[in-house]
Image (cartoon, rainbow, N blue to C red):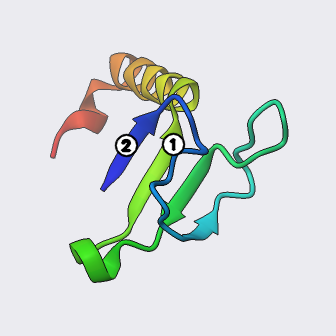
Amino acid sequence: MGYAVDDMTQRAGTHCVFESFGATLPDGGAAVIHLDTVTELGYFVELSERSLVSRLNAAIDAHLAQHPESAAG
């Protein structure tokens, strides 16, 4: 389960188990983290910085506009 968030520091006391090393914020912090919520929820939760998610979604939309056959599922 993933969420786009504005503040990557708000983790509600949940332990971060993985940071994506390729995606960083201007201050050097991780732009994508995975929280250890398996015991509570049964799955990991991913938090992604909102502007990164917006850029990724725009890139996906642009690709699909140029290659509509890619959307066939």
Secondary structure under tag 1 reads strand
Q: Quadrant of residue 33?
A: bottom right
Image: 49 above or below 65 = below
Image: 50 above or below 17 = above
Front residue of this view, candidates 6 and 72: 6
Front residue of this view, candidates 58 and 49: 49
Q: Give the alpha-carbon distance from disc 1 to disc 2, as whole Å.
A: 6 Å
Q: CB of mark 1 within 8 Å of CB of mark 2?
A: yes
Q: Quadrant of residue 72?
A: top left
Secondary structure under tag 2 reads strand
Q: Residues within 10 Å of mark 2 (few under 14, many from 20)?
A: few
Q: Is residue 16 left or right of residue 45?
A: right
Q: Which mark is residue 3?
A: 2
Q: Which mark is residue 27?
A: none
Q: Which mark is residue 48?
A: 1
Image: 12 above or below 18 = above
| Screen quadrant of the N terminus | bottom left
Amino acid type at image mark 2: Tyr
The percent coordinates of residue 73 (x first, y second) are 15, 46
Amino acid type at image mark 1: Ser
Residue extending furthest toward the front? 13
Which residue shows up at 35% across the image and 16% down it?
65
Which residue shows up at 77% across the image and 45% down it?
29
